[in-house]
Amino acid sequence: MASLQMAALLSAPSTPVTSDRVRLGPLRLSASSSSAARNGGALVVRSEAKVSGGGVSARGLSLITHAVAEKAAAASSADSKPGHELLLFEALREGLDEEMERDPTVCVMGEDVGHYGGSYKVTKGLATKYGDLRVLDTPIAENSFTGMGIGSAMTGLRPVVEGMNMGFLLLAYNQISNNCGMLHYTSGGQFKIPIVIRGPGGVGRQLGAEHSQRLESYFQSIPGLQMVACSTPYNAKGLMKAAIRSENPVVLFEHVLLYNLKERIPDEEYVLSLEEAEMVRPGEHVTILTYSRMRYHVMQAAKTLVNKGYDPEVIDIRSLKPFDLYTIGNSIKKTHRVLIVEECMRTGGIGASLRSAIIDNFWDYLDAPILCLSSQDVPTPYAGTLENWTVVQPEQIVAAVEQLCK
Amino acid sequence: MAAFSAVKIPPPQFTTVRSSSQRPGSSPAHFAHSPSAFNSISFGSAKSVRSRPLFAVSSDVVSSDKTKPASSSASNPAVTREVALELYEDMVLGRAFEDMCAQMYYRGKMFGFVHLYNGQEAVSTGFIKLLNQSDKVVSTYRDHVHALSKGVPSREVMAELFGKATGCCRGQGGSMHMFSAAHNVLGGFAFIGEGIPVATGAAFSAKYHHEVLKQSKPEGLDVTLAFFGDGTCNNGQFFECLNMAQLWKLPIIFVVENNLWAIGMSHLRATSDPEIWKKGPAFGMPGVHVDGMDVLKVREVAQEAIARARRGEGPTLVECETYRFRGHSLADPDELRKPDEKAHYAARDPIIALKKYIIEHGLASESELKSIDKKIDDVVEDAVEFADSSPLPPRTQLLENVFADPKGFGIGPDGKYRCEDPLFTQGTAQV
């Protein structure tokens, strides 16, 4: 039903991630894939980690299971709506629009989110629809308008604060750490901060060091904060909606290079779980944990690996804080080998924390040391060649799996 | 301008300035709609200010230095008896509470950084007593008295200081983080300046509720007061929020408690232009300078600023010249402030001044005021007893308020949400 088309990310000529079209056959849906509906007409979906392995061979199709929301009666019928195709930034916008329509306390704040429509067009058209106060163009004062978002969250609103680039939110670190993360606790639970902080981050195409930052590693220690990273139009929309509905402060990491991904997503409303990981490709030999853009480098490496006879299990962890130890653990218990592929820098990144969590919880199930491929501890250079060498490339992933599976 | 430039900064000159409005009972039309018009009728005309740097304005309502003819210090008092007693009681509560905090700290009942408000009571009382329950107060680490003025019970504040489970923040906040949802006290912030954006957000929320959600009130917009000090006025968040508040005409009042010192840094050594009220008009809002040792003058200014905000006319910057009688915190040896400066402000103790005013205008008798003193002593004693006898937070409380939705702790290896783990409520679960 749903097919994932990986469109060319940008039309730059010398891109290592080439446009890659993977057409999938019809999805087999696990009939027990949905937990009880919680919110009105929308199903809050919790994916089942296991997919019957019988139909998937090591050389077969990469089967991507989506926990697609469907009414129970239509679970097995082929009459379900075909869905609609859109790009990732449009999916984010759709999610945001639906939530703003549903709840008048949801509002957006950020630089150029209103009349300009957002620097990556995520909020295009929303100011016309909802007005200048609900889609607020702020002056360039990240710390203060993030704090303003927090103050309004404490007093009944549900703001979505956009960092034009995630890196700019370094200026808002005071507010994000002290007030966003901690205020619910220091107030003894009296005030909640249902804020969503979102924006594009990650290494782009020669954007220079300061526009290529990965703030997830800086924010992960902040107590009281949840962090999620979207990677497909489907999970982008679902996570956006979930983040807005959450009573906790959530940081939603988008990636500069993924905004133009195209996918067919369901017409009916769905909300994903913030705390769950996504099974991208089930396998037997090795667990590859990744998120955001590196998912695509991993999937590209997976094709090569499959041709070489390996069967990698690829999990998009999605929830950077907290980790979904259930999905991750089940995978490790099956494969006994772990490779983490991330875009964070080596030191203090998400991979570092994930590694410790795995050692703490699943040490006995490991047959090999955990490998972690991260970006170099280098300010991202401008030159294209140097930039490519700072991030993890598919060849390195292939080599790492071969080493793990020796 | 370099800190060590050749310009000599003269010491503060305490001159009495004739205010354009002589009768305290009149309702001054201070707040004209255009900030420039306002400037010229602030206490001291702008022109005279520019020619001679003015750092302090003595109140002419309660000052003992009567340089004006007797007829201008009108026999009709500025406030009614009820209001005068309310103000007196609130200031005495603030003073007695803080004095008790000092005692308790040195007896080892409270710990950490404790910043006392002695001497500044006129600002808190002058402003906060004009607010409704739904108006918001945002403060700094020197927040005990703001919380008390807003209505948070002394027991809850004292218990919070003792770190007990019955504190207003369950013992999790402490001296610098007083919060009360019931009384709309939005903190209590340890880093200076970080409360100002939060206050701006609360004001934004008030405007949003009115314009988008169409939840209007007959009295007008809910008002937010942001209290902070002179040191904060050199911080970026201050300026950024002045801009945004005026841009969107938010119902907020920026109340600067200029006590001339940021720990050991004199305001004059830290600030290129020490007249903070002037920074309001730079952003398009009125800037007022008021004697913060005079509760009636503060209240007068506050009244006008609050009315402006309620009408949707936007923010006001109010600089209150005030002074803290104690050190920056209970750990501060307070060696840098000169004795004559301290003596000057001790002579302008706002409580003594109001007491004198009340008696001189026949609003109440000495014995009535004494009975208020006694009543407050009892309240504070009771607060201490309550705090003393309250339980410390149990282990089970440790993880309860980290997330509003405890699913945020994530999914454990067994597939269940961590917060479903029975050990979780005992505070011993691994997270």
Image (tube, coloured by chain):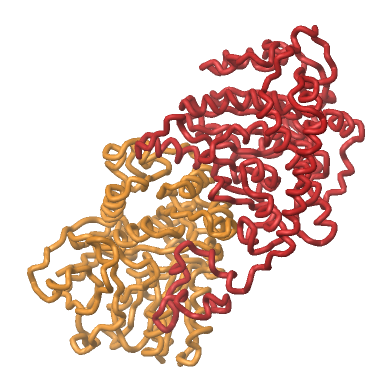
- Seen as rendered, the residue at the extreme right is B339
x and y percentages locating residue B220 in the rendered image: 45, 30
x and y percentages locating residue B267 in the rendered image: 76, 34
Chain in red, by letter, is: B
Residue visible at 44% across and 82% down?
B413
Q: Residue A8: in sight, yes or no?
A: no
| A195 left or right of A306 in image | right
* Image quadrant where residue A281 sits: bottom left
Residue visible at 69% across and 62% down?
B163
Q: Colour of chain A?
A: orange
Please tell me which residue lies in front, B163 or A361: B163
x and y percentages locating residue B151 in the rendered image: 62, 44
Residue visible at 60% across and 46% down?
B194
Determine whether A260 is above or below B260 in the image: below
Please tell me which residue lies in front, B84 or A320: B84
Q: Residue A31: in sight, yes or no?
A: yes
- Seen as rendered, the residue at the extreme left is A79
Please tell me which residue lies in front, A318 or B155: B155
Image label count: 0
Residue visible at 29% across and 42% down?
A126
Indicate the quadrant containing the N terminus of chain B: top left, top right, bottom left or bottom right.
top right
Determine whether B152 is above or below B316 in the image: below
